[in-house]
Image (cartoon, rainbow, N blue to C red):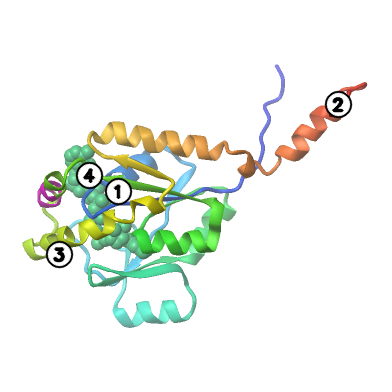
Amino acid sequence: MAESVHLDRRGVLFVLSSPSGAGKTTISRKMLAADPDIALSISATTRPPRPGEVDGKDYHFVDVASFKKMAADGEFLEWAHVFGHRYGTPRARVEELLDAGKDVLFDIDWQGAQQLYQEAGPDVVRVFVLPPTMEELERRLRARKTDSDEVIAARMARAANEISHWDGYDYVLINDDVDACYGEVAAILRAERLKRRRQIGLIGFARDLIRSVPDADTTI
Ligand SMILES: Nc1ncnc2c1ncn2[C@@H]1O[C@H](COP(=O)(O)OP(=O)(O)OP(=O)(O)O)[C@@H](O)[C@H]1O
Ligand SMILES: Nc1nc2c(ncn2[C@@H]2O[C@H](COP(=O)(O)O)[C@@H](O)[C@H]2O)c(=O)[nH]1
């Protein structure tokens, strides 16, 4: 049997954004459970932890002074104010994951997606997740039972603004059925991984194939 070929490729910076409650975290968890080649960028935030959230796993929960220092020291790839708190993507973990040959998953808002795209351009794949209806969005926020009525009202009030940025994304999906939506997200990631520009060794591999033909006609 012929030896299998392995080509190195550039890592994908895979962004999921949506209005709060549309299902990013749910889809992210499915991706991370199913695919060992992608890992989550763990954000720092000044928001207090929700019940069940674990420091260092869901977020790095920090106070405002620490967050400001991290931002001033250039530790964030991007950061933004969201729902009255600060959220940012620590640069070091992303670089470590990419160096280790992993793709990186980002659960960040539209401001973060824009900044990341400015930093990393075509390595970034941006996916926006829409809820089927605004009523269902509110139902999901309530069903999650993690936020007070005030917090839910503030997130619903902000949802239309978040949705208005849908056209800054490469893909826009409707999360009606979560398994179907996850299937679409997984298909996008598979296809993006195969893009020609990400295959680092492809030029040499194709050139060697051509050269291995003794009397190849390489005229155009
Ligand atoms: N397709 C779906 N149908 C029904 N419920 C769903 C669906 N997708 C997600 N949910 C539920 O909706 C709630 C909100 O989902 P999730 O926490 O993943 O949203 P999110 O976009 O990450 O929100 P946030 O931005 O606030 O972190 C959860 O209780 C989740 O189980
Ligand atoms: N720009 C960034 N946005 C982030 C980051 N981490 C999370 N988020 C977004 O904030 C809201 C609220 O999140 P929640 O956990 O409080 O519900 C949501 O849209 C996240 O995507 C980040 O590092 N940068």
Determine the secondary structure under disc 2. Answer: loop
- For residue 131, the mark is 4
Residue 140 belongs to magenta span: yes
Give the labeled residue for mark 3: 154
Q: Mark 2 and mark 3: span between their CA atoms?
A: 64 Å
Amino acid type shown at disc 2: Ser
Amino acid type shown at disc 1: Lys
Ligand 1 is within 8 Å of the C-beta of the residue at disc 4? no
Q: Earlier in the sequence, mark 2 or mark 3?
A: 3
Ligand 2 is within 8 Å of the C-beta of the residue at disc 3? no
Displayed quadrant of residue 121: bottom right
Q: Earlier in the sequence, mark 4 or mark 3?
A: 4
Give the labeled residue for mark 2: 212
The N terminus is located in which quarter? Answer: top right
Please tell me whether residue 123 is drawn above or below residue 64 in the rendered image: above
Residue 65: x percent and y percent?
Answer: 33, 83
Amino acid type shown at disc 3: Ala
Q: Mark 1 and mark 4: span between their CA atoms?
A: 10 Å
- Where on the image, by quarter, is ligand 2? bottom left
Q: Mark 4 against mark 2, which lies toward the viewer?
A: 4
Ligand 1 is within 8 Å of the C-beta of the residue at disc 1? yes
Residue 220: x percent and y percent?
Answer: 84, 29
Q: Are marks 2 and 1 in contact (CB under 8 Å)?
A: no
Give the labeled residue for mark 1: 24
Residue 150: x percent and y percent?
Answer: 9, 65
Q: Is residue 61 left or right of residue 189?
A: left
Please tell me whether residue 213 is drawn above or below residue 40 in the rendered image: above
Q: Residue at x 23, y 33 (%)?
A: 177
| Segment tinted magenta in the rendering | 138-143
Residue 143: x percent and y percent?
Answer: 10, 47
Q: Mark 3 and mark 1: span between their CA atoms?
A: 18 Å
